[in-house]
Image: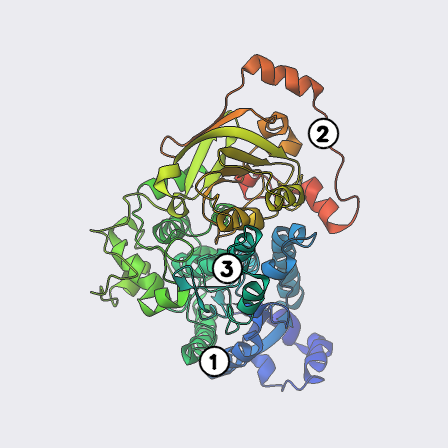
Amino acid sequence: MKYRSWDTTRGLERGTHRALYMSMGYSAEDLTKPMIGIANAWSTVVPGHFNLREISESVKEGIRQGGGTPVEFGVIGACDGIAEGHIGTRYILPTRELIANDIEAMVEAHRFDGLVLLGSCDKIVPGMLMAAARLDIPAILVNGGPALGGMVYSGKKCDVTALVEALGRYQVGEITEQELRAMEDNVMPTCGSCSMLGTANTMGCVSEALGMTLPGTGVIPAVYAARKKAALESGEQIVKLVEHGITSRKIISAGAIKNAIRLSSAIGGSTNVALHIPAIAYEALVDFSIDMFEKLSDQTPLLVKINPAGPANVPDFHDAGGVQAVLKELEHLLDGEALTVTGKTVAENLSAVVRRSDREVIRSIDDPYSESGGLAVLWGNLAQEGAITKPAAIDPATYYFQGHAKVFDSEAETNQAIMDGKVQAGDVVVVRYEGPKGGPGMPEMFRAMKLLNGMGLAKKTALITDGRFSGTNNGCFVGHISPEATEGGTLAVVENGDTITIDITKRNIHLDVSEEELAARFKKWERPAPRIESGYLRMYARLARSASYGAIIPHREL
């Protein structure tokens, strides 16, 4: 077979290319083998990526054992947790496009034959999967794995996000500053992606359900020896994928996308999948509509409740059988013919999985938490293009919530008002101008929801926004409201005191204001000036599409 890398390694006219490789210690024999790129997001900034240098060594060993030559390059990766609460949070979602573009440029410039993707955290994994789908070469994703759970807090092993809840408790006098500070040393005992089912670990699960990660390896904890073994096996397998011509789009098919949505629904995954799966589908040339989340989630039972929805964390989920155990329960609902990086179909992989009798973490399909899954799409005069919520993280008692709007034009303004006690029971907190264009960058309203929870208001208030949420949030919340306020969505003209009704059961979100009144308000409305005047965020604000399209920067017709 002909390798892509021959464009750089074969023929007398490529002597300069070979010389450049050999100057770094590659041998002439190395350059006759498949050249496998390793896109590594390792850094000492992101806990979920801290172990990726070690993981990369195992991948390289596997590639060499498989008969290939590893070629490693770096990829950016920002930490949501460290970026949260200041301007940095606006950069997080937009880094996804940078990562996809960066990997595309490196792979095409150097003509690698295959690609191993090393990343763990929130926007890094989806950005890498987008790149794999766009490039359509053999690729496999290896993540660094979740951290182990920390001290027991609120009845469960906690993670770093518990500190924000605890801050809310401190604000109302339930704990002391000394107790709050003492938690910092005990909430994150190891490196790894945060141990709750946030976006990072949700996307690890989604990658496995898509077929882009070896079965059973999506959420192996970062400190387990099995994580290195999975990396070695992935290195061996990528060479096989190259030899057999199994490219990413053969794996990321329409059936695989549906399988991933069902898996995310069954485990109550992060609402951010409603941004990332459409973006991956776009790159894989798979037709997609936000309606697909509603249809498939409605038909998929909720089998798992992981922190913040329940006491178990992601390492507990892994120990209980993880993604493969859930897929086995869902087997009759899946596209079993979808191909995976094993070279086998989903059905063939699942034939080796034995249903477990231990049901403490993963319930049987005959005994689900609910008959429908984790995500829901709401529609109404506040969200003509849809909005996303997560019933799996919401107390059923608040599936219907009606209250009076308390309107804020930024996340920072909202957080300060909550801290100052200006949000009361019965309020519907409206946070607008935080969408892809307005934010810009569609930041998470993570801190606002955690503060409300810590202050005992999670079940007494609701929060709606054109921004997004963290997978660790709970309470009554609706995000991704489209069109966003900056684009002239109805959210832009909500006023303090307006009645807003959220009806999750009926999939509706409604502003109780007449069409005539709305028209009058829009005549007075003026689009706000951009928050960011230059740099990448300004470019992203100009080019990004609506959250209903995954907040992508399109490079072809939608």
Pointer 1: what residue?
A: 62
Pointer 2: what residue?
A: 527
Q: Determine the secondary structure under disc 2.
A: loop
Compare residues 214 and 455 and report the one nearer the observer: 455
Q: Where is residue 502 in the image (x, y as percent from the top left)?
A: 44, 31
Against 70, is 415 above or below?
above
Q: Earlier in the sequence, mark 1 or mark 3?
A: 1
Looking at the picture, which amino acid does disc 3 mark? Ala
Looking at the picture, which amino acid does disc 2 mark? Arg
Looking at the picture, which amino acid does disc 1 mark? Gly
Q: Determine the secondary structure under disc 1.
A: helix
Compare residues 340 and 520 and report the one nearer the observer: 520
Please tell me how many numbered marks the rendered image carries: 3
Of the residues tagged 1 and 2, which is closer to the observer?
Answer: 2
Of the residues tagged 2 and 3, which is closer to the observer?
Answer: 3
Q: Where is residue 5 in the image (x, y as percent from the top left)?
A: 60, 71
Pointer 3: what residue?
A: 162
